[in-house]
Image (cartoon, rainbow, N blue to C red):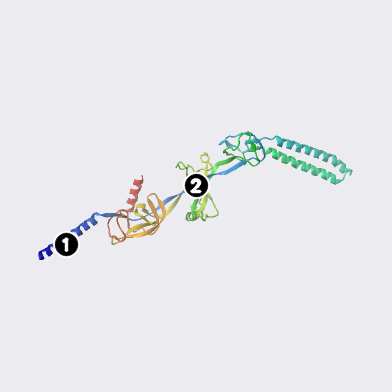
Amino acid sequence: MKRIVMLMGLCALLCHIGCKSAKEEKEGDTKLLVTSPLKMDTTITSEYVCQIRSMRNIELRAQEKGYLQGIFVDEGQFVKKGQLLFKIMPTLYEAEQQRAEAEVNIAEIEVQNTKPLADKNVVSKNELAMAQAKLVKAKAELALAKAHLAFTDIKAPFDGLVDLLHLKLGSLVEEGELLTTLSDNNKMWVYFNVSEPEYLAYKAQANTGKKLEVNLITADKQQFKYPGVVETIESEFNNETGNIAFRATFPNTEGLLRHGETGTILIKRPIKDALIIPQKATLEIMDKKYVYVVGKDNVVKLRPISIAAEIPDLYVIKDGIADGDKILLEGLRKVKNDDKIAYEYEEPKTVLSHLILASE
């Protein structure tokens, strides 16, 4: 019986020693990679979906009723200011002008005949004044008739591109009916929405007297060759989105941009003494970001962080950690809060250089 008890005790001791040795061997073999945040000056690029608009984009409508007698442009054609675009049949308005001209001639003759008589007191001064008033009225009606006739010629009010033609030759045109639209694309206005914090950052820069320069990415993912400048901000924030609209002006001398296009605005913002960590060093729990911070006793503590900006593969940290902290870089899913770990430390510059090479 004693021999059996001794054998059982010996087995238990050997098992304890064996398990302890296996655990120590596992801890020794499993060394996790640890690094620190890197403090440096950097530039972040923010992207905004944008709408591209012509500086002047207007509707050309008929100012008189009639048949469309002439169309002198084609869709997409560039026209010069004052160029004739459409002509509405002017027969009726020519007749009105001729009648008005005749009325003016009659009134002039009446004034010419009445004035000598009034000078000799044959007729009263009031009769002369009445004749002169009739002449003024006839001239006003003539001017109105000339205006109506002139409205049958629709001319370009500025240099621009003609859009879709809404009516065909010979169509009956109603007063106010849309004929086409005209766009001045010499400069383009690009609208995009920014958040309140970004607006405040812009205003801080604007107070220095320097205008914000932006770049445009077109729908084919190419950067537009000319930069733009933010010149205008809307007066109010959108209460539903918390955003406010900015307007940037871009030169368009080559005519690449057209009214109605979409794109992406890029804004570069320098950050001094930014605290940067790799994105892979973070965990996301309930829409919040966390890192494991390694203490002096090699125990990891889960700590929440706030993100100031995002760069490819990197985060710029707003708060939660300091530049001297050690954070777990790999094996985040292998540990739990308050675990004691063995680790190898890698310099943050080396870590970042590996990320840059991998992205390339």
What amino acid is found at the position of numbered circle 2 in the picture? Answer: Cys
* Residue 270 - label: none
Which is closer to the viewer, label 1 or label 2?
Answer: 1
* Residue 50 - label: 2
The residue under label 1 is 12
Is 47 drawn above or below residue 15 in the view shown? above
x%, y% of residue 272?
A: 42, 54
Q: Secondary structure at mark 1?
A: helix
Which residue does the image show at 42% across and 51% down from the upper left?
43
Could you say which is closer to the camera, residue 198 or residue 166? 166
Q: Quadrant of residue 106?
A: top right
Q: Residue furthest front?
A: 1
How many numbered markers are drawn? 2
x%, y% of residue 18?
A: 18, 58
Which quadrant is the N terminus positioned in? bottom left
Point out the tag, 1 or 2, that comes first from the N-terminus.
Answer: 1
Do we see residue 314 in this rendering? yes
x%, y% of residue 225?
A: 47, 42
Q: Distance of mark 1 from mark 2, alpha carbons?
A: 73 Å
What amino acid is found at the position of numbered circle 1 in the picture? Answer: Ala
Which residue does the image show at 84% across and 44% down from the upper left?
128
Q: Quadrant of residue 291?
A: bottom left
Could you say which is closer to the camera, residue 209 or residue 332? 332
x%, y% of residue 143?
A: 73, 40
- Asked whether, in this view, residue 175 is left or right of residue 332, the answer is right
Which quadrant is the C terminus positioned in? top left
Q: Residues within 10 Å of mark 1 (few under 14, many from 20)?
A: few
Q: Secondary structure at mark 2?
A: strand
Q: Quadrant of residue 82?
A: top right
Q: Residue furthest bottom?
A: 2
Q: Are marks 1 and 2 in contact (CB under 8 Å)?
A: no
